Image (spheres, grey):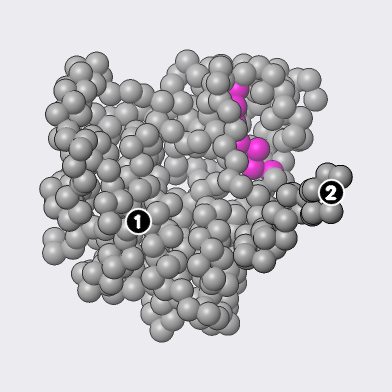
Amino acid sequence: MNPSASQPEMSDLTEDLIARVIRPVVRGWQSYHVPSAEGMVKLDAMENPYLLPPELRAELGRRLGEVELNRYPVPSYTALKAGICQHLGVPDGYDVLLGNGSDELITMLSTACALPGRTVLAPEPGFVMYGISARSAGLDYVGVPLRADLSLDMPAMLAAMDEHKPVITWLGYPNNPTGTLYEAADVLRLVEAALPYGLVVVDEAYQPFAAATLMAELPRFNNLVLMRTVSKLGLAGIRLGYLSAAPALLRELDKVRPPYNVNVLTEAAALFVLEHVDVLEAQAARLRAARTVLAREMAALPGVEVFPSAANFILIRVPDADKVFAALLERKVLVKNAGRMHILLQNCLRITVSTDEENAVLLAALKAALHAL
């Protein structure tokens, strides 16, 4: 007799265990999917396509080779924070909080503000991690649809604030995945409206391409948090985000920051690049110019609607996004099929602005895909 014949299957036991210990909201989620880009022209993740110049890469390699990998980071990150404040426009008297990319900062904010019954608010479509982080922390999440032209619906936002009294309101400036740069006056009006309820976090991940920032407004509003990342500036691989806010608020947020959350290689690389931030700013200027050209050329294609963008990507609407996306894949061009993200993005594709060579490949593939419809 098989001694295990009367025992439940291991898979059954595992499913029972999962049902007992994992929250239902988590069991209902899908893992964050990042498609393979091997062999592709990769235009799906809003990355800067340019490397550092060879002489800077060589010097960076030397610096990294001197890092003591056997030691933990110094958790105050004093030099790195000072460098960010000096080179990236943080107001005098303000400091920054560092994270392993913006994602960790979003998690820290949700964790610090989480109490049962509290709500997080954001326009939609927006960055998916706002809602994921809120629900992970046990917060309620309310999305307020943008207008059909992807601008802020101010009456709807103000009404939602009055109804839900959000502890955090997220605003992408410019917004992902639409590329929309909301009116600064509207954003600041929402900051004022949120004063009785909580924080407004202005996410300036794409600030290098917007040529606009609300960083200077920090001293005016004690509930304003300004968040950025160095990823889009050209350092996606080192995973470094930072935020600034009123000093007393920043000290409270720092209490939920994991110790040693920025590794020594990231710290060394960031310190080095801050010495040469002009190189990255020049690359951003090239991409802004390329964005103008690419938007104009795509708008000239039959059946393509191009939405205004202040980021390093362009959102377009095509007659059939699924078919065009598949046709681009066949031609080894990877973009983001945004049509599945939100009803307002039906038949939309989000396309990263890249080098002249890769933009030309995209245009040729897009023309062929549209012709085949």
Which quarter of the image is occupied by the C terminus? top right
Which residue carries the number 1 mark?
A: 227
Viewer-closest of 237 and 295: 237
Q: Which image quadrant for residue 318?
A: top right
Q: Which residues are magenta?
A: 333-339
Label 2 to label 1: alpha-carbon separation: 57 Å
Residue 336 lies within the magenta run? yes
Which residue carries the number 2 mark?
A: 5
350 to the left or right of 372: left
**N-term mark: 2 or 1:** 2
Q: Position of residue 132 (x, y in %)?
A: 55, 58
Q: Position of residue 214 (x, y in %)?
A: 32, 58
Look at the image and tell me whether residue 362 can be seen: no
Which quarter of the image is occupied by the N terminus? top right
Q: Is residue 157 above or below residue 68?
A: below
Q: Position of residue 249 (x, y in %)?
A: 27, 72
